[in-house]
Image (cartoon, rainbow, N blue to C red):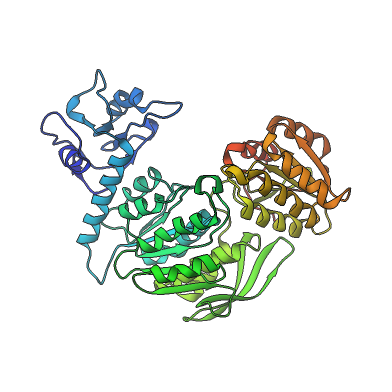
Amino acid sequence: MITMTLAQVAAVTGGELAGEGRTPVTGDVVTDSRAVGHGTLFAAFDGEHVDGHDFVAAALDAGAAGALVTRAVPGTDPGRTVLVDDVAAALGRLARHVLAELRSRRTPADPLRVVAVTGSVGKTTTKDLLARLLAPLGEHIAPPGSFNNEIGLPLTVLRATGTTRTLVLEMGADHVGNLEYLTSVAPPDVAVVLAVGRAHLGEFGGIENVARAKSELVAGLAPGGTAVLNADDARVAAMASLAPGRVLTFGRSARADVRAEDVRLDDAGRAAFRLHAPQASADVHLALVGEHHVTNALAAAAVALDLGVAPETVVDVLAGAGAASPHRMDVRDRPDGVRVVDDSYNANPDSVRAGLRALVGLAAGRRSVAVLGEMLELGEYSADEHRAVGADAAGLGVDVVVAVGEGTAPLADGAREADGDATAVVHVPDVDAARTLLGERLRPGDVVLLKGSNGSGIWRLADALLEGTTGRTAS
């Protein structure tokens, strides 16, 4: 973050501060008191399980310059606490100010570029690929994991300094209006839209509202910004009419500006293809597992090539870029010969189907086991979507389907109804029961996919199954 006094922080955020507020903030903004360092600003959130106000005194004692709070904290210096109505909103105002200030300091020949990514699937993987691909352009910042909401995005923006060349942001949404707000904080120079899928259907109220929400990223582009759109998704391609500047497309379609041809998978489930772009054509071999990552790679390559990264660098980076964020298509072999495909970070109908296709491809003659937790936030569509995914699992030839949790009963029913006795289907009540079942039934050679919404807890099962293994992706 750029250096600001607490008085300046108070002015920008609309907060109240006792005294002159001359103490400078010279470090990052943090929400965890354990991450406090000298000169940082501590943001005290009143969370569901932990109230950050309980740690303000410890943060100040540890060297924080000050804290953003929503109420007075007894025993602390009121000259070091900025009182605001809403900490998240204050972070947004602070991030908006800092980014505008950083942009104003740069010249047209040496701009600070903001690259933002959204989509119902693939956001984090594409963000991770962009972080690696854009590194040759100079100092860059990208969030860890999925810092993609009204708290995580400002925290990422506030890490930028005067030497930052590229800021890669992930923007997520579960309601119409989310991305309109996030782009008001950080208007992107490049907006990447990957897909309009069936995530958060219960919150959005239908697929057309999902498309409307994702289009807010394109509408929120900075003047003259570039929209990078998936030509294979009709709802995404239609967003071109909202772009204030250039439109660059990617996909497998012949009309895409950056496209993949001759897509094929190796025995480890990794895709290779012929990349065609205005800058060059080249053969690409991905380190990521799953054919669905072709779309993510094309999107990232389109941005990198357009911003001036050399084609040979793009090819080399994609060949070496495995899963960078936890629980995302992390493929590992256990000592007992069981191969675990951990894609348990989150789930929606589209991403589960992509995971199932990858599982079947990886198994290739070995027994395939799909351990599927509930897909949350589907609302009235939940039963139908779970039933359809179960039917697809059986239709793809998955050997064993383990449905975990009460909400997956329709998934188990769909698998049974679709394939009779060809697919073994087990429905268990929770993660603990699934762990016991797998401990009894997994055998050497099995390939196991773990997939479910974060709230389903399937990630805990993945951690348990992978305990004691190395972090090295199987080959």
Residue found farthest to the right: 421
Give me the residue at 87% from left, 49% from top.
Answer: 420
How many dots with numbers?
0
Work out whether 204 lies above or below 360: above
Give me the residue at 82% from left, 46% from top.
Answer: 416
Query: Is residue 123 rendered to the left or right of residue 65?
Result: right
Work out whether 7 lies above or below 283: above
Query: What x and y, as percent, mark residue 176?
Result: 43, 51
Work out whether 454 lies above or below 261: above
Give me the residue at 62% from left, 47% from top.
Answer: 381
Looking at the image, which is closer to me, 374 or 448?
A: 374
The image quadrant that residue 29 belongs to is: top left
Q: Name the quadrant of the C terminus.
A: bottom right
Looking at the image, which is closer to me, 143 or 422?
A: 422
**Residue 335 visible within the image:** no
Residue found farthest to the left: 20
